[in-house]
């Protein structure tokens, strides 16, 4: 066990790189990709055939330290109570060609991997944070997803096209959320762009309307606790919970709508698509059981509307414990996956979002499925055949699902090692906990303060996801990311 405080970050970085290799992910770019990158000195230039939308008050909203900016948004109020929403997506394919060395690295990892100690970007930072990023006050090429939304949140029209755009304000989630909620001042970049304040409030209004429409049709409103390590220099000091806020929800709701438009656009043009699906939950009976313990009946067959209504009631009735219930439901719903939808076929849909048409298209700097979808969109716009065969798409769908799972495991591994560092001095202390996983491989619990997960090594008989108990910290192992608890009465 390593809890030398001056070596925390270095230890986690070593663990992260080891975990990347063990999971079949490449932590570094190969020499041919580096050589290819050296020849890229400027953003992609337009060819004069695309629209010029650079004068619109586009803005990005992301984490405070994010520079790999994938999306810009803007809104326009129309007559009759309609609103036009535009989402600009970075045209990564304009510089990262299919079959290039850099594309090969992206295809191998399929995603950026974010760990507490080090970020392993899917694309070289020279691209993702500069040349292909929708960077602050820079002209860039984009694929624009246009949506016309009615007052009830339904989409009445949509389109996809290429355009030149310019980010007028690089904004951060927390400051925008505080301003929208009336808890903080207007962010300085907002004040510097005429009309941007009213535009962002219109976007927020429409995001709330879109969300309400989805929830009426059974979309699930879930809230989990994502804890990230807080460092003081190179020493880990605490775990900080990163909660949803109004600005995060604004972007999330607009991206969900844009991804749906993308899927339908490809379907209408008889091109295949890589759909993001969450199948009907196999452990629905356990979800019914969890709800029953709370005095809430659910139907015996999976029904997203009933589950959504139950979750809404529980959020109001017990907001403090709602993240724990959300985590239980998420575990029982099962993981998302990528599948191919061919023209004339129907993919399973996304149970959690209560939508049939859904893809990933809005983060091509960070996710390979989005870059792949961008190439399909550009083929559709050009009237060209799909750039991938059906067999290639099927292989890529399975590979992207597999690598996403591998990346998640790397991130969890490093997060657990960081948590083990923080808890190393607390062996023997007792905590309230909830079961987050139960299978023949073991039973896992999450303690509430600090919010960390570990394995229950004794007293796990008869427990299932959602059960609560008192546990004692038995041991930690930083290298393996092990945190062991035992049940106490």
Image (cartoon, rainbow, N blue to C red):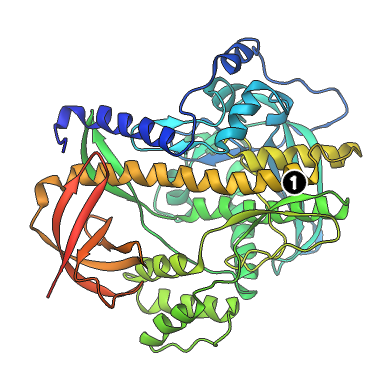
Between residue 292 and residue 222, name the one nearer to us. Answer: 292
Task: Where is residue 82? Give x, y as percent.
Answer: 76, 60
Task: Where is residue 49? Give x, y as percent.
Answer: 88, 28
Q: Is residue 435 above or below residue 391?
A: below
In this rendering, position of residue 68 left or right of residue 43: left
In this rendering, position of residue 266 left or right of residue 276: right
Quarter of the view holding residue 13: top left
Residue under circle 1? 145
In this rendering, position of residue 77 left or right of residue 172: right
Answer yes or no: is residue 168 visible: no
Residue at 10% x, 46% y: name it. Answer: 425
Residue at 73% x, 28% y: name it. Answer: 98
Residue at 81% x, 61% y: name it. Answer: 345
Quarter of the view holding residue 461: bottom left
Between residue 63 and residue 150, name the one nearer to us. Answer: 63
Answer yes or no: is residue 308 visible: yes
């Amino acid at each position: 066990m390593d809890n030398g405080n001056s070596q925390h970050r270095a230890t986690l970085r070593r663990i992260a790189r080891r975990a990347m290799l063990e999971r079949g992910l490449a932590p570094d770019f190969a020499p041919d990709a580096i050589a290819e990158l050296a020849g890229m000195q400027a953003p992609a230039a337009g060819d004069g055939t695309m629209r010029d939308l650079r004068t619109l008050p586009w803005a990005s909203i992301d984490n405070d330290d994010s520079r790999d900016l994938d999306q810009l948004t803007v809104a326009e109020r129309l007559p009759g109570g309609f609103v036009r929403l535009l989402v600009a997506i970075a045209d990564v394919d304009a510089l990262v060609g299919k079959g290039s060395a850099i594309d090969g690295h992206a295809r191998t990892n399929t995603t950026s991997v974010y760990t507490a100690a080090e970020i392993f970007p899917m694309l070289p930072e020279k691209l993702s944070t500069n040349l292909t990023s929708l960077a602050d006050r820079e002209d860039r090429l984009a694929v624009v997803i246009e949506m016309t939304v009615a007052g009830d949140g339904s989409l009445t029209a949509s389109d996809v096209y290429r355009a030149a755009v310019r980010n007028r304000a690089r904004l951060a989630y927390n400051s925008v959320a505080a301003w929208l909620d009336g808890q903080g001042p207007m962010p300085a970049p907002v004040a510097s762009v005429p009309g941007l304040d009213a535009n962002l409030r219109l976007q927020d209004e429409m995001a709330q309307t879109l969300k309400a429409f989805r929830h009426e049709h059974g979309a699930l409103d879930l809230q989990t606790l994502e804890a990230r390590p807080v460092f003081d220099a190179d020493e880990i000091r605490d775990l900080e919970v990163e909660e949803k806020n109004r600005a995060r929800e604004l972007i999330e709701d607009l991206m969900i709508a844009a991804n749906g438009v993308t899927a339908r656009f490809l379907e209408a043009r008889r091109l295949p698509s890589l759909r993001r699906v969450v199948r009907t939950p196999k452990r629905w009976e356990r979800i019914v059981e969890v709800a029953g313990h709370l005095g809430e009946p659910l139907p015996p067959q999976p029904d997203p509307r009933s589950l959504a209504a139950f979750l809404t009631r529980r959020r109001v009735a017990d907001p403090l414990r709602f993240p724990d219930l959300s985590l239980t439901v998420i575990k029982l719903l099962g993981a998302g996956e990528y599948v191919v939808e061919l023209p004339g076929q129907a993919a399973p849909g996304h149970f959690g979002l209560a939508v049939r048409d859904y893809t990933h298209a809005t983060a091509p700097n960070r996710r390979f499925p989005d870059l792949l979808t961008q190439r399909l969109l550009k083929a559709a716009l050009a009237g060209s055949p799909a750039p991938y065969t059906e067999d290639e798409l099927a292989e890529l769908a399975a590979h992207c699902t597999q690598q996403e799972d591998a990346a998640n495991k790397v991130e969890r591994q490093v997060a657990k090692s960081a948590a083990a560092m923080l808890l190393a001095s607390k062996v023997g202390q007792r905590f309230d906990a909830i079961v987050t996983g139960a299978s023949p491989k073991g039973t896992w619990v999450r303690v509430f303060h600090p919010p960390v997960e570990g394995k229950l090594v004794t007293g796990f008989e008869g427990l299932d996801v959602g059960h609560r108990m008192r546990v004692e910290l038995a041991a930690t192992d930083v290298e393996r990311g092990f945190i062991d608890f035992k049940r106490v009465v």
